[in-house]
Amino acid sequence: MSLTTEAGYPSLTDRMTPVDAGAFVIAATFLGGAPAFALGDGAVLFVTGEGDLRVPAHDGGLLAAAAAPGVLVTGGDDGRILRFQGASPPETVGEAKGWIDAVAIGPDGAAAWSSGKRVFARDGKGVVKSFEAPSSARGLAFAPKGYQIAVAHYGGVSLWFPRVESPAKTLPWKGSHIDVTFAPDGRFVVTTMQESALHGWRLSDGGHMRMSGYPGKVKSLDWTADGKWLASSGADAAILWPFQSKDGPMGKAPKELGIRPSRVARVAAHPKAAVVALAYEDGCILLARLTDGAELLARPASRGGTVTALAWDPSGARLAFGTEDGAAGVLALPEG
C-alpha cells in the first residue's frame, strides 16, 4: 500500500488529493463528512463530492477559528462570531465591538470569544456573559468538565466560571501567554508563551511546570488520544511532554518524533491511534507513531509556504492540511 521515497520514508503521497484554497488557511476540519477550510480572506471552503464550495463568512479577514466534531466557529475583522455545522450559511452566535482575537468551542453548543480585554461566553441556551481580563485575552479554552473557561493573557491565566458572579481565579506566571489548553482529564492547564517555552499549572495545588528549550515559538499543541502526551511544535521535531503521572512532566524528559532539517509548524494527534501528524515550515507532512517512532511521508517538502492548519476527521481516516500561501489537501489513509 505504500512506496518508499529516495529520502527513505515509506510514502502515502499518492493518497493526497490537492486542494486550491486560494488564501491563507487559518484552520482545517471536517463538517458533514466534507473537508472544510477557514480562510484568511473571510470565507470557508468546503470540498464536496459535487466540487468546491466557497461560503462567504466575514466582511474583511477571518482572524480566528476553532473546530470540534461537527462544528466550526470563526471570528473576524467584522467583530462577528459565526458557527458552521455544514456548507449551509452559518449562524451568527455573537459579536464584539472590535476584531476577534480568539474563539473556543465548549460543551452543549457553548462558545467563547475575545476582543481586546473583553471575553464573552455563550452557553447552549444562548445566554451570554462577559468579563474583562487583566490584559488582552490571547487564548481561550473550555475545561473538559463543567462550564469553565481558561483565558491566557499577560501575567498568566484566568479561570472564569461564566455562571458564577465571583471573580475569576488567576494562575500567575510572568510573561505573555498566547494560547491555552486543558489536559483532557482536567488536572492541568498549559500555555504557549511569547518566549520559546510552555508553562503549566497543576490545578490541585497550583504547582508550576516550565517546559523550555525550544529553538522557536510554540504555535501548535495537541493531546494524544489517551491524554498521556502533549505534542508541540517549535523545534526540528515534535516535542511530546508526558502527563501520565500526578506531577505531569515535572522532572521528566520529553519524547521527540520526526526529526528533520525544518521546524515543526503544526501537530495533530490521531483521534484513536498512537500516531501524530507533523507538518513542517518547509511544507513537509509526516505521520509518526509514538510506540516506535516509525514515520510515513504524507506530503514532501515544497517551495510553497508553511503549513498553518492540520486536522484529522473524527474517525482518523482522513487528514486535511492548509498552508499560508493557499495550498491545501486531504490525505485518505488506506483501509485497515
Image (tube, rainbow, N blue to C red):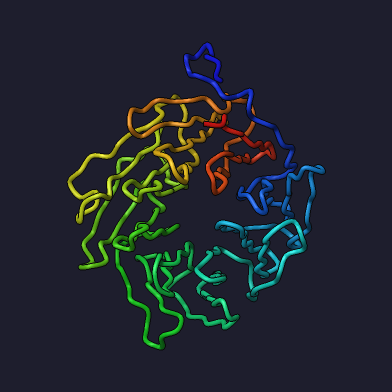
How many numbered callouts? 0
Q: Is residue 68 above or below residue 157?
A: above
Q: Residue at x 27, y 45 (%)?
A: 242
Query: Picture coordinates of residue 98 (x, y %)?
Result: 63, 71
Q: Is residue 61 left or right of residue 203?
A: right
Q: Residue at x 56, y 76 (%)?
A: 124
The one of 98 and 27 positioned closer to us in this rendering: 27
The one of 53 and 75 positioned closer to us in this rendering: 53
Query: Picture coordinates of residue 236 (x, y %)?
Result: 41, 31
Query: Picture coordinates of residue 26 (x, y %)?
Result: 62, 50
Q: Is residue 41 left or right of residue 257?
A: right
Q: Is residue 199 left or right of residue 55?
A: left
Q: Residue at x 79, y 51 (%)?
A: 54
Which quadrant holds residue 144? bottom left
Q: Is residue 296 above or below residue 252?
A: above
Q: Residue furthest bottom?
A: 165
Which quadrant holds residue 272? top left
Q: Residue furthest front?
A: 336
The one of 219 and 67 positioned closer to us in this rendering: 67
The one of 18 and 234 positioned closer to us in this rendering: 18
Q: Is residue 290 above or below residue 57?
A: above
Q: Residue furthest left?
A: 251
Query: Picture coordinates of residue 103 (x, y %)?
Result: 55, 64
